[in-house]
Each structure stands twice: as C-alpha cells, then as structure tokens.
Image (cartoon, rainbow, N blue to C red):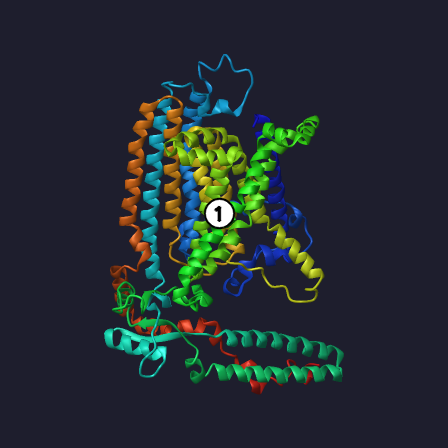
C-alpha cells in the first residue's frame, strides 16, 4: 500500500466521521428523534431526568454543536458507577486504559522509534520512492545495532502494559467488593441456584425434596425456596391475553369515534375471549397445577449472605451430579428458558455451539481472503485483469486499495457479534450476562483468527498453513514477516473501525430511518415508544480488545500507527459514554465480571507482541535480541498466573469475608430480615409464567368501558 492509499483512507474516514457527527448533533436536537437519541432517559426508570430540547422553530435547533463532547470528561467514575453499574465503568476504564497506554507509546514511538526506523544510513541514499516501509522496522538493515533500541522499547512497553493491567485489576476488584456492599438489597446475595433436584420419594415432588434436604442439612440457615416451572403454555396464554387486551382497547377507541353497533358486538366477543383466557391463567397458576409442572431447578434463599456463599461453594450431595449449587444471578439477569434445559443435554449444546462457531469462522475465511486480494493491487490485477481499468481514473486505485478493503471487512464483521450471541444463548447459559461473556469470548477469538491472522496469511492461505504444520518452530519468523508486510492494512482498519464505526454508532442511522418508515406506514397514529436496548457489551468489548491487540503488536513494528490509536480510544470513550447516558439501558450488573476476560484478551495481545518481536529479531539476524526476549515472555506468563491466583477467585465467588461484613452492616441497621424476605419472593416475581394478572384485567372489570358516558 502506498502513502497515497493511506491518505485516501484517512480522508474518507475523517470525512464520513465529520458528516456523521455533524448530523448527529443536529438530529439529536429534534424532538421527534428523542425516542432514538434519548431512549434511556425517556424510559420509566429514568424519566425523572429532564430533557432540554428545542420545541420551537429556532436557529440553534438546526445548528451543529459540540456541547455533548465535554460532558464525557466532566462526569466522574463514581457518577458512572452509581448511574450505570460496574460493568459500564469497566468498559469506560477499558477505553481509558487504551488512551493511557497508547499515549505513552505514541510519545516513545514518534520521538525514538520513528527516527531510528526512517534515518537508516544504509537505505537512505538508495531510497528512490517513498513507501510506508520507511517508517517501520522493515527499514532496518539485518544485524544493525539499532535493533537494540527496539528491544529496549519492547521491554519498556511490556512492563508498562503489565503495570497498567495490575493497577486496573486491583482497582476494579476493590470497586467490585465495595459495590457488592452498596447493592446489599439485591436478592442474589441471599440466593443459591440449585440444579438437578431429585424427586422426593415420599411425595413425588421436587419442591418437597428441596425443602426436606435444606431443612435437614442447613437447619439454622435455610429460609425458603422458589421452584422453576415449565410454563410454556402459561407464557403463551399471557402473551395472547396481552395481545387480545390491546385489541379490545383499540376497538373501544374506534367504537367511541364511530358509535356503531356492529363494532360493539365485536368488542363483546373479544371481551368474552379475554375472560376465558384470564380464567385459564388463574387456574394454571394455582398451587396444585404448578406442582405438576416443577422442573429440577430451584432458587434457595438463606437467612444470611454468609450461609448462601458457603452453600454455593460446597458440594451438597454425595452424588456430585445431584443438587448442584452456585450463586444465583440477579432476578432480572436470569435466562429462564435456558434454566429449563435438562442438565444432561447441556454438554451436547456446548459441543454444537463450538462446532457452529468453528464453521462460521471457516466460512468467513472466504470474504476475508477476497478483501486481502483487493488490498494487494498487484495480485488483484493478476487474478482479475479487468481491475487494471481503475488505473485510468486518477486517485481511484488509492481509494480501492486504501479504504475499500477495510470498509468491506468491517461490514462483513458487523453481523458476527449477533450471530455469536445467538450461539451463546443456545449454549444454555443460566443468565444473560453469561451469554454476553461467552459471546465476547467467541467474537474476540473469531476476530483474532479472521481479521488478524487470516488477514496476515490470506495471500497464500493453504501454503502458509501447511508450512506452519510442517515447521512449527518457524511460526515466529513467519508471523513477524506477515505482520511487517500488513502494517498499512491494519492502519486503515483502525481508521475505519474508529472514525467511521464510532461515528455511525452514535448516529444510529438505521433506527432513525426505521422510525421514519414506521411513523408513516404501519405505526401511523400510534404512540411512539423509546427504542430501548440493552448495552451491547458483546459487540463493543471484543472489537475494542482487537484494536488493543493490533496496536500492541505494531507498537514496536510500526509506531506510526500509535497516534491513530490514541484518537481511536478518545473518540470511542466519548461515543460510548453518550450511549450509556442517553441511549442504552443497563439491564443487569455483574459487578465487574467482564474485567477478567478483558485482562485475558490484553494478556494474549502482549504475548503475541513479544512472539512477533522474537521472529523479527530472528529475521533481522539479531539472534541475541531474540534469545533475550524469551525471558520477557516467561515473565509475562508468570505475571498472568499470579493474577489468576491473586484476583480471579474473588470475581468467580462471593468472598465469605465480604458476605459477613455486609451481614453485620445489615444487622446493625436492622435490615437483614427485610432483605431476606424480599429475596424469598424475588425470583417468583420475575418468572415469566408467574406473571400475575392485574386487577384491571380480572374478569369482573373486563366489561367496564375505558371512558365513562359523561365523557363521550
């Protein structure tokens, strides 16, 4: 790729970003777009926060502004934690990690590495044309002592990354433990999820078995239990009832306007159906009927958090396949349908998910290879001779090879997170947060395999894979050679993902167009509700982690990329802070359980950076530097093992010490009994099939009109 291609990519991405952000700042001021740009603040839970929109036709309403940008830097982390939870703060700190890391690396790279790479005494007189290789380690001659500068920078960057990672892990753990104390009202702190509940031999019910077992073996700490029911028929009836109720309301409204007798007959018929369905729901929700639909899953509530934590972390039954316990997710986080999946089927589900993810990865090798063919114009002309026609249009070849490949690749990859989230759901996770965490893992490794590694070797895919299998010792040198050759492509990828990707994320163009079409077609005259969605951690975290990986690998190889990454993380921080505040809803809070996975992604990135440099030092005939890098790899691995021992267990379990401290605080304030009683009914209140019919929907009130005769 030539500098002209990189300049074309940068110009297009900057232009698109400016246009998108300009449109966003104008469209956000329009009252009709509030359902898109202020969906979170318009929801019931956050409606107390006023909106400042221009209702009258005035000039400021149609002028772009940047007032929403400084807001991201004025809000403290404590405010983010209180408004959105620790998971949101973890994402914000991920962007801050990127800013801190790449800012220092940029200063080091531009002031030290770039001059060393560019002013190479052996190549400077013979350089006839400018290329991007002049700004990378490729420009250093074999055996040059200048490579010790790169070696020193590698050690410094690695230790700086490990220092930041340790600091983040330690800080987030402290915040996590404090947040658990702040959220002491949550039902999941008192509740243990029990699976594979056997039938009671005396009464032939599972609820009785749970009560007998925990009353006997946890006599002084057991409080109560809530069973899970097979409520598919109930959920169907509840959905049908809501739909029918809405139809009755619409018919009453049209009857008031038309005052027709025929319409009144239709209303009477619908009301009769509604009464029948409501009576069926009441009957199926009775205790006798529900006992016949018990599933081998229960939520067991204990009298204290300490006892719940102890029960969750110990084996209950002599048969480890029965009465399997773990801390329950919070009620709004439970994946109710997946809990109904039999335990013996879950391994098959997981194997199926792994196979499906592998097939998806292999399938997407085709578009990635095609994209790399476009990026390498010389090969493109060889494979597709008509492509030579673009040479006759000035500047077009720069656009095709510079911007088009990364844009196409980004477009293909947009659907991957949603596909992986669907696969994670099929895997049988007990909570929505677990589904997103599993999706994060699958998306990250998919992107690492397809976007990074496959982009490196796609020029001769089968030959390279065969070479890796037959000569595994040569993997570092092959990786180093491929990394050095693809620096320009990944620079354009960062530009496209950051400038275009983030700006289109905040613009929400798809929702705006959908809302316009809906307003003038099937949604005409209907009440417009906010487009409120859960925050897409499964989409944001892997993408940002991939950018960190690319940046780390190229930190020493191509330092020219580093300033772009600083801009990438600054823009991402501003955009996603705005989305948290105004657009997306935080539907659950795992108290920071995403961070250990983010830590792992960054650890993998550091290891890849170091292995790549081992290969590069070997290619540059500097074996002493390559050998001296091996201890750095061992130090990094040892550090990661230390983190697994020091920090990871506190993210997996509910520490007994923390549980006791919260219990003591509750007993001091006289709130222990209140929180325990609330936990004893919380899961039944959220179980879909146990949704109660309100008094307004009861059979005695169905025949009453929506409006009195005095108002007609």
Quadrant in the picture for residue 257: bottom right
Q: Which residue is mark 1?
A: 72
| Whole-percent x, y for residue 448 in the image | 46, 42
At 37% from the left edge and 25% from the top edge, which residue is drawn?
618
**Depth check, front residue: 594 or 369:** 369
Q: Is residue 658 above or below residue 643?
A: below
**Depth check, front residue: 473 or 3:** 473
Q: Secondary structure at mark 1?
A: helix
The residue lying furthest to the top in this view is 125
Q: How many marks?
A: 1
On screen, residue 660 versus residue 333, left or right, reads left
| Neighbourhood count class around disc 1 (C-alpha, 10 Å): few under 14, some 14–19, many 20 upward | some
| Whole-percent x, y for residue 682 in the image | 40, 72
At 53% from the left edge and 49% from the top edge, which residue is drawn?
416
For the C terminus, the image quarter is bottom right
Q: Is residue 212 above or below residue 565?
A: below
Q: Is residue 658 above or below residue 576?
A: below
| Whole-percent x, y for residue 351 in the image | 43, 56
Q: Is residue 72 above or below residue 621?
A: below
On screen, residue 215 versus residue 13, left or right, reads left
**Depth check, front residue: 35 or 288:** 288
Can residue 446 be seen at all in this image of the molecule?
Answer: yes
At 56% from the left edge and 35% from the top edge, which residue is drawn?
372
For the N terminus, the image quarter is top right
């Amino acid at each position: 790729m030539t500098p002209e291609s990189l300049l074309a990519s940068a110009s297009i991405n900057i232009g698109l970003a400016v246009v998108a952000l300009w449109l966003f700042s104008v469209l956000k001021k329009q009252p009709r777009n509030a359902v898109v740009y202020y969906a979170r603040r318009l929801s019931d839970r956050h409606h107390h926060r006023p909106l400042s929109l221009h209702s009258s036709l005035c000039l400021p309403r149609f002028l772009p502004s940047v007032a929403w940008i400084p807001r991201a830097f004025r809000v403290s982390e404590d405010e983010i934690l209180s408004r959105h939870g620790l998971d949101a703060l973890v994402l914000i700190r991920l962007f801050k990690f990127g800013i801190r890391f790449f800012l220092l690396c940029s200063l080091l790279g531009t002031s030290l590495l770039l001059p060393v790479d560019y002013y190479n005494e052996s190549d400077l007189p013979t350089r006839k044309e400018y290329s991007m290789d002049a700004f990378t380690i490729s420009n250093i001659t074999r055996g040059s002592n200048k490579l010790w500068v790169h070696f020193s920078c590698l050690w410094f960057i690695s230790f700086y990354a490990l220092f930041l990672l340790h600091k983040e892990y330690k800080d987030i753990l402290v915040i996590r433990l404090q947040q658990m104390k702040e959220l002491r009202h949550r039902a999941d702190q008192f509740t243990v999820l029990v699976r594979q509940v056997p039938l009671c031999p005396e009464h032939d019910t599972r609820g009785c078995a749970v009560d007998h077992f925990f009353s006997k073996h946890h006599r002084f700490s057991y409080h109560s239990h809530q069973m899970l029911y097979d409520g598919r028929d109930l959920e169907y009836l509840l959905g049908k009832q809501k739909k029918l109720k809405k139809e009755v309301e619409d018919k009453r409204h049209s009857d008031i306007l038309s005052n027709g007798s025929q319409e009144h007959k239709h209303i009477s018929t619908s009301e009769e159906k509604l009464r029948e369905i409501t009576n069926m729901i009441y009957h199926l929700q009775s205790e006798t009927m529900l006992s016949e639909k018990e599933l081998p899953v229960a939520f067991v509530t204990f009298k204290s958090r300490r006892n719940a934590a102890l029960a969750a972390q110990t084996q209950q039954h002599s048969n480890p396949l029965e009465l399997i316990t773990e801390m329950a997710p919070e009620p709004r986080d439970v994946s109710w349908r997946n809990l109904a999946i039999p335990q013996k089927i879950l391994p098959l589900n997981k194997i199926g998910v792994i196979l499906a993810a592998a097939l998806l990865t292999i399938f997407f090798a085709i578009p990635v290879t095609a994209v790399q063919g476009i990026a390498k114009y010389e090969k493109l002309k060889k494979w597709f001779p008509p492509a030579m026609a673009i040479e006759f249009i000035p500047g077009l070849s720069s656009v095709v090879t510079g911007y088009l490949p990364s844009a196409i690749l980004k477009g293909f990859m947009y659907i991957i997170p949603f596909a992986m989230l669907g696969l994670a759901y099929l895997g049988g996770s007990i909570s929505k947060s677990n589904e997103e965490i599993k999706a994060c893992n699958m998306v990250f490794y998919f992107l690492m395999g397809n976007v990074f590694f496959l982009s490196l070797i796609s020029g001769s895919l089968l030959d390279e894979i065969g070479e890796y299998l037959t000569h595994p010792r040569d993997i570092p040198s092959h990786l180093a050679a491929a990394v050095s050759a693809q620096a320009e492509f990944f620079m354009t990828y960062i530009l496209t993902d950051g400038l275009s990707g983030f700006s289109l994320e905040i613009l929400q163009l798809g929702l705006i167009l959908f809302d316009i079409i809906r307003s003038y077609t099937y949604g005409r005259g209907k009440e417009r509700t906010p487009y409120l969605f859960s925050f897409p951690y499964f989409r944001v975290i892997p993408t940002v982690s991939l950018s960190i990986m690319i940046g780390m690998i190229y930190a020493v190889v191509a330092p020219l990329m580093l300033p772009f990454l600083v801009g990438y993380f600054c823009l991402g921080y501003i955009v996603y802070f705005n989305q948290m505040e105004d657009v997306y809803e935080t539907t659950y809070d795992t108290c920071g359980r995403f961070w250990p996975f983010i830590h792992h992604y960054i650890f993998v990135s550091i290891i890849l950076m170091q292995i790549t440099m081992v290969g590069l030092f070997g290619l540059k005939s500097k074996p002493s530097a390559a050998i001296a890098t091996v201890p750095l790899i061992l130090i990094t691995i040892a550090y990661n093992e230390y983190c697994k021992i020091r920090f990871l267990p506190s993210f997996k379990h509910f520490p007994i010490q923390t549980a006791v401290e919260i219990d003591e605080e509750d007993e001091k304030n006289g709130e222990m009994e209140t929180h325990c009683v609330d936990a004893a009914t919380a899961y039944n209140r959220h179980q879909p099939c146990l949704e109660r019919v309100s008094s307004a929907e009861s059979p005695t009130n169905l025949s009453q009109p929506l409006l009195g005769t005095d108002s007609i």
